[in-house]
Image: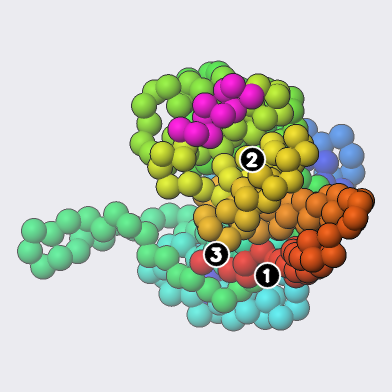
């Protein structure tokens, strides 16, 4: 049977830490808790489960904290968990079964990460595979009978274990400050960090967050990046300019983006602009394109719930205008009522995709 070290980094998790550890502690062979500066009862709660509790001064670097926690592990495998995760009884049994039959050549085990619908998320699906269990020491192996080479890609197993994610709240404000500090320090983002920053901005950013991000994404845009990166930048900058009411820059950017394959994010921004201008017919056009004619590249809601809500608002206004006309156009009223009912039902029934695997 494989032995497993649980490695966690925590800070002010008194509300959820016991729930997490109660669901997994007996499946682990050692528990390592790295505290990055808690001021609540986190350490007291952790001490009920382990005496391996370490301090790590927070330095705006999650990787550094994770690496420190891994350095304390001594078992064959390392399991990473956040305090707002848990395993239900069915998946505890799956985990125990996996532990008993885990083949030594497997180096990474992926598990299905599930964010329940009642909790907000920057993910574009309720369920996605994430690497969660890692072999602590890797053995390098030669492969191929001729022109032999060392196998560099890890052996990954996609398990059926489902981890429930129940966050107390999004950590976007904390993350935004780290994104800005990282760019100011390094002058660049990795593709992963750039993409995650853009996603979080579109999902949870306010006008101040977009103001902080604008020059960063302008720098990236002006560096002649590939088309997919240009489109990510355009999505962020279009929202920033709309929030600033900078019509000239907003339309320069959105029109240029239309020269390539339009995305739902840009169509949604155009719909939102015309809705704010009370041009409901034009807003209807762009919301419809966002919902039915284009695909999202960062925030799947811009091809679903958001433009559907925009269409509902448009037809609500159009219906009121049609009813107020003297004489009232009964045919137009009937059309608007039908459209309003349709889009309201579509919005109410929209859900995130179940899996992104």
Which mark, residue 356?
A: 3
* Dot 3: element: loop
**Label whose residue precedes the other's in the sequence (3 or 2):** 2
Rendered location of residue 332, percent (x, y)? 78, 61
Q: Where is residue 228 in the image (x, y as percent from the top left)?
A: 42, 42
Asked if the magenta segment contains residue 326, the reply would be no
Task: State the scheme by which the image is colored.
Answer: rainbow
Q: Residue 319, located in which quarter of the rendered image?
A: bottom right
- What residue is shown at x 57% (from left), y 42% (from top)? 266
Q: Residue 269 carries which label?
A: 2
Could you say whether the residue bearing mark 1 is in a helix, strand or loop? helix
Where does label 1 land, which residue?
Answer: 27
Q: Is residue 322 left or right of residue 296?
A: right
Residue 318, x across and y down, in percent? 81, 52
Up the image or down, 108 lies above or below 91; here it is above
- Number of residue marks: 3
The answer to whether mark 1 and mark 2 are in CB contact below 8 A is no
The reply to whether residue 279 is visible in this rendering is: yes
**Residues at badges 3 and 2 in contact (C-beta under 8 Å)?**
no
Return the x and y of residue 47 as percentages of the image width and height: 82, 50
Residue 51 vs 254, above or below: the answer is below
**Side of 118 relative to 150 (left or right):** right
């Amino acid at each position: 049977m494989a032995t497993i070290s649980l490695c966690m980094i925590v800070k002010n998790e008194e509300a959820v830490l016991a729930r997490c550890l109660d669901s997994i502690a007996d499946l682990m062979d050692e528990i390592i808790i790295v505290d990055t500066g808690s001021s609540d009862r986190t350490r007291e709660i952790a001490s009920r489960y382990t005496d391996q509790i370490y301090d790590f001064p927070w330095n705006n670097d999650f990787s550094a904290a994770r690496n420190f926690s891994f350095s304390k592990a001594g078992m064959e495998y390392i399991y990473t968990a956040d305090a707002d995760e848990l395993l239900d009884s069915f998946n505890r049994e799956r985990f125990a079964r996996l532990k008993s039959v885990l083949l030594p050549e497997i180096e990474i085990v992926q598990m299905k990460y599930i964010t329940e619908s009642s909790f907000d998320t920057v993910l574009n699906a309720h369920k996605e595979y994430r690497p969660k269990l890692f072999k602590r020491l890797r053995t390098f192996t030669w492969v191929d009978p001729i022109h032999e080479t060392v196998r560099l890609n890890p052996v990954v197993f996609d398990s059926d274990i489902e981890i429930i994610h129940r966050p107390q709240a999004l950590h976007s404000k904390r993350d935004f400050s780290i994104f800005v500090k990282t760019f100011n320090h390094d002058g660049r983002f990795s593709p992963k960090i750039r993409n995650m920053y853009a996603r979080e901005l579109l999902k949870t950013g306010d006008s101040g967050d977009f103001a902080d991000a604008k020059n960063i994404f302008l720098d990236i845009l002006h560096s002649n990046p590939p088309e997919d990166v240009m489109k990510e930048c355009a999505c962020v900058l279009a929202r920033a300019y709309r929030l600033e009411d900078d019509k000239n820059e907003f339309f320069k950017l959105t029109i240029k983006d239309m020269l390539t394959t339009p995305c739902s994010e840009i169509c949604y921004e155009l719909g939102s602009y015309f809705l704010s201008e009370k041009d409901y017919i034009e807003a209807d056009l762009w919301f419809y394109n966002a919902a039915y004619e284009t695909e999202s590249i960062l925030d799947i809601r811009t091809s679903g719930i958001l433009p559907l809500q925009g269409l509902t608002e448009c037809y609500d206004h159009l219906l009121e205008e049609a009813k107020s006309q003297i004489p009232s156009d009964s045919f137009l009223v009937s059309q608007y009522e039908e459209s309003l009912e349709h889009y309201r039902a579509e919005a109410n029934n929209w859900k995130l995709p179940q899996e992104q695997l």
